[in-house]
Image (cartoon, rainbow, N blue to C red):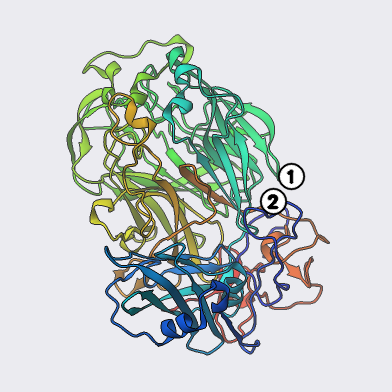
Amino acid sequence: MLDASLPLPAATPDASWGPLVPGFGPDAGKGAKPAIRRLLPPDAEKFARDDTRRSGLSAEEIARLRDGAAACSVGIAYPSEGTVFPVGLQPPTLMWAVPPGKIQTGALVRMHYATDSVDYSFAVNAERPGELQIPQDAWFEIGARTDQRALAIELSIGFEDEVQRCQTSVRVARGALTGSLFYYQSSLDVAESFGVGGQPPEGSEMGIYRLRLGTGQLEPFITQEGANCVGCHAMNARGTKLISMTADLRLENVSVTDSYYVYDISSGKPERRAKLDNTNFGAVTPDGRFVLSVGTPDCTQGEIYDVPPNRGVWFVDGPAVAKLQDTDTGESVAANGLDPSWYMWMPQFSADGRMVVFNHAKPDPEREGFIDRRELAVMDYDESTHTFSNLRVVVSHLGPEPTGAYDMTTQVLGLLHRNGRDSCMPPLGQALTSGKYDRGVCDGPCYPAWPAFTPDNRGVVFSLIDQPDFNHSAGRKQPAKAHLYYVEIASGRVVRLDNAMRVADLDEYGYDNYPSVLPVSVGGYAWLFWTGRRSWGTRGGGIYQPGAMGELPGLAGSSSSRRIWVSALRLSDATRGDALTDPSSPAFFLEGQGERPSMRVSAALDACRAEGSACETGVDCCGGYCSSGECRVPEAPTCSKATDACSSAADCCQDGTGQACIGGFCDLIVLQ
């Protein structure tokens, strides 16, 4: 069973959740009570409500919308058919494109389950043609009654000459997401970001933001201090420790100096603690006690993204070796099984702390002085002895071979340089100090990056990118191509997540990077978050947006379209026979994430609560059990309900819905 001394995550909510109350969304925490999402049993009272009159439309127009049945030529642009939503987030905005020359008079939507547990109608007038958002309270009621089967959506769109009727369906998982998302929000103005002309101003709100999944509240968490950029963060699964870099990025300074700090966030607010050595993009153990920092083989003189082939990755000062550090003291910790020639880039621990995955960067045996960065590897980890063992490569040289020349000097960020560690002198040869070398860029994604375990420890989600610096976009004339993949650890079988990457405009396909997975399963799904560059339904975005970034040399567009997207991944039936199928579902836009460009999201749980504390699910409790709204381990032997701790499926209550033990907690089995 669960070790109560190690605060590990749990899973979904259940029917014990309390009544719905106001206070969800941007105003949560500002005097309003927090929203409590809950699920209802199958025999709960039907939710039947007609809110069409709230639109202000006349009774005649509403009747016309109900009766209209012209063929749908408009199509529903968002959400996509088959999208899976969790309970309790902001409701999706339905979108469609109003044809040129057409004038919309109104729209009406009806949503219902086949079980007849929900029958809801809502209408809008013509103030916002092409869009309709379900009221928050109604969306909560619909989610509370989900049986994970299709939720039918019938949309009637009124024009002056006809009413078109369009249909689609989505699913609502039987569970509410828990924890928080931490991500970097930048500026639409690159002059503000990099201190051009005396900017950024004091009080800039660029930096790391926190979105609480339980309330929808967005808050600046660790923001920029003058010209000191904060970001490139790492954190533990339980959400008690966050490590962030602080760097002076003013262009007039030419050099980049940076520091790494641990923040204790267990209280809900960041409190700066130890200063660490060179921990950019490291991996924090689930309990937050240690961080695995990455290695880089040679002196780092070069560009801000450290791309020359015999050096490291993103801000990491070299030379350095991968090592463990204590997050409380900042001191190095003796570790077993680490090889100095394994640089372990972009590592991540599994939610139970028993494995670590990383880009298996190492000296290239075929190109002297270069790094082979095209493998993904997994190792076992024993925290009691700090031992890494059982290295196995799970992805190797996927995609085309690199053939194109890499030239960092075309990027604005290539103007930024950093001093090498201990004033070391960088090696010469092949113009490495200018950030140029041959055979670096692939004609299609080929470098595995930013891996993250699924909660069941059976798979890893990662991005595959065509650039050797693993950077998605910043400073490029064109964004890097990046695809999302899933690899099954035991077999090494790989499948691309085409469902998650599905877009309406093929020109926007394949700009998906920086994946992160919620440490627990919810409603039988793993929940994948990532940075995507694509349009949101009919709203602009796509790859490029004009703006201040286009005013600087070498840049054709800005990063304003970098936003956070979400996909539900099946856990129970991704493998069918000898075939590995795409476990992802069509992506949905994370509403409420803020207006600034968002990137590098980290999904984490909230700090666990002690015995006797109030709780909503087992995920809240350090002991892993929530009983009658209180963190309390059951006195008498009993089966574990959804979200409570387990060591095997036999511990989980089998109430007809089917449950499995996933990542140490009971959750539903989803078959579809």
Please name the residue that numbered disc 1 is placed on.
267
Residue located at (61% from left, 35% from top): 222
Task: Assess disc 2: are there few (<14), some (14-19) or many (≥20) residues with their C-alpha within 10 Å of its C-alpha.
Answer: many
**Viewer-proximal residue, 95 or 125?**
125
SS at badge 1? loop
Q: Amino acid at mark 2?
A: Ala
State the image quarter where residue 219 is shown: top right
Instruction: Mark 2 vs mark 1: give the one in front.
Output: 1
Say if 125 sits above or below 111 in the image: above
Q: Residue at x 33, y 27 (%)?
A: 551
Quick one: label 2 or label 1, which is nearer the N terminus?
1
Residue labelled with disc 2: 607
User: Where is residue 379 shown, x and y percent of the image?
Assistant: 45, 47
Q: Looking at the rendering, in which quadrant would you find the N terminus?
A: bottom right
Residue visible at 30% across and 67% down in the picture: 102
For this view, does 666 lie left or right of residue 250? right
- Tell me where residue 2 appears, x and y as whole percent: 67, 62
Residues under labels 2 and 1: Cα distance? 8 Å
Q: Is residue 477 visible?
A: yes
> Left or right: 308 with respect to 62?
left
The answer to whether marks 2 and 1 mark residues whose Cβ atoms lie closer than 8 Å is: yes
Q: Is residue 323 above or below residue 482?
A: above
Q: Nearer the viewer, residue 268 or 545?
A: 545
Q: Amino acid at mark 1?
A: Ser
Tell me where residue 11 appears, x and y as whole percent: 60, 65
The correct choice, above or below, for 453 with respect to 41 in the image is above
